[in-house]
Each structure stands twice: as C-alpha cells, then as structure tokens.
Amino acid sequence: MMETLSAYIKTITALTIFSALACMLMPDGSFRKYVELVLGVLVLTAVLNPFLRIFGTDKGHMELGLLQNQVRLEKVFLSADEYEQIEQQRVTQAYGQVLEDRVKADLAKKYSDIDWISITFCQDIEDEDYGTIEGISIGCAEEDAKKIQTYAAKRYGLPEEAVTVEK
C-alpha cells in the first residue's frame, strides 16, 4: 500500500516538474498555450487515475481518454479563432438549453399542460444584452393560451407579441 502511494506521489511530482520545465522552455507564442493545455490534462489524468479506478475505471478512463483526444484534435486542426468560435457556439447552445429547461420548469409550476418551450435570446457576444431573452414560444394543451401568453410576458419582462403560444 505504501509502495503504491509512494509511486503515485513520485509520478505526479515528476509530471508536474516536467510540465513546469517544458512550459519554461517553450518560447512565447500561440503554440505555448496548447502545450500548457496538453500538459495540464496529462497531470490531471495522472492525479485522477486512481480515483477513476476506484469508482468504475473502464467507463471513466475511456471517457477521459476520448475527451483528451477530442481536445488534442481540435487544438491541432483548428486555428485559435476557429476554436474560439466553436467554443462560443457550444456555450451558446448549452446556455439556450439551460434557459429553456428553467423557463419550462418555472412556467409548469403555474400551468401544468406546457409541452415544450423554445427561447430566442441575444447571441451577439459584443452586445451588452448578450443572453437576454428576446422571445418565447410555448407549446401547450391548455385551452386559454392568452392567459399563458400574458403571464409569461409579464414574468420575463417581454412585450406580449414576443411570446407565442401554440396549442
């Protein structure tokens, strides 16, 4: 047990020292941040490896390996601008999904017949209103669509025209 712990600590120490030296020896430039990312993931993998084995190694190790490969491929084949654009799209998509889920859950507290929600929001990162809801489409089986439209518009500070309810 102590030998395993000792080997674990030595491995992490050696990887950390290697990473620090490699980062110090790298010249400043756009390639340096990619090397730092890969080395950071390598150290993180070494730190997490025993825990992944304890809590279900195969699946966790496989998923971490796939993530590492995806990051490596994206960094190698994409320019910094392309990679930033892809990451921005991922963030926007995730934000939109979370926003829709939360609005649906919020509206479902008052109206239980809501089937789906679709939200449009400001996606221009340069705009000060970035992320602000611009419109909501609601699908429901409720007979009184006007009540839902009025409630959602007031609840989210939108004009009633920006909220549509479809039966």
Image (cartoon, rainbow, N blue to C red):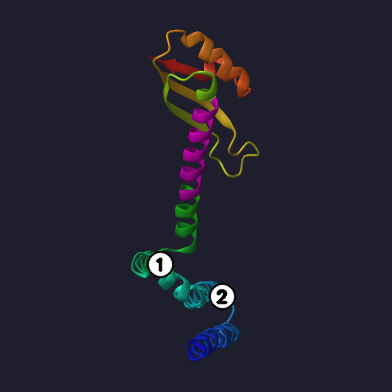
- The kind of residue on which mark 1 rests is Leu
User: In what quadrant of the picture does the C terminus appear?
Assistant: top left
Residue behind mark 2 = 29
Residue extending farthest to the right is 128
Instruction: Find residue 69 and report its image quarter.
Output: bottom left
Q: Which residues are magenta?
A: 90-106
Q: Earlier in the sequence, mark 2 or mark 1?
A: 2
State the residue in front, 127 or 5: 5
Callout 1 crowding tier (Cα within 10 Å): few <14, some 14–19, many ≥20? some
State the residue in front, 95 or 147: 147
Using the image, determine if residue 138 lies above or below residue 128. above
> Under tag 2, what secondary structure?
loop
Report the predominant secondary structure element of the magenta stretch: helix
Is residue 103 part of the magenta span, yes or no? yes
x then y, percent, for residue 128: 66, 39
> Under tag 1, what secondary structure?
helix
x then y, percent, for residue 50: 46, 76
Residue at 48% over, 35% down: 101
Q: Nearer the viewer, mark 2 or mark 1?
A: 1
- The kind of residue on which mark 2 rests is Gly
Residue at 59% over, 84% down: 20
x then y, percent, for residue 22: 54, 85
Q: Are the two marked residues, 2 and 1, in contact with CB atoms closer than 8 angstroms? A: no
Report the number of discs: 2
Residue behind mark 1 = 64
Callout 2 crowding tier (Cα within 10 Å): few <14, some 14–19, many ≥20? few
Is residue 71 part of the magenta span, yes or no? no
State the residue in front, 78 or 68: 68
Residue at 62% over, 39% down: 127
Q: What is the CA distance from the residue labelled 2 to the residue labelled 1?
A: 28 Å
Residue at 58% over, 38% down: 131
x then y, percent, for residue 60: 39, 65
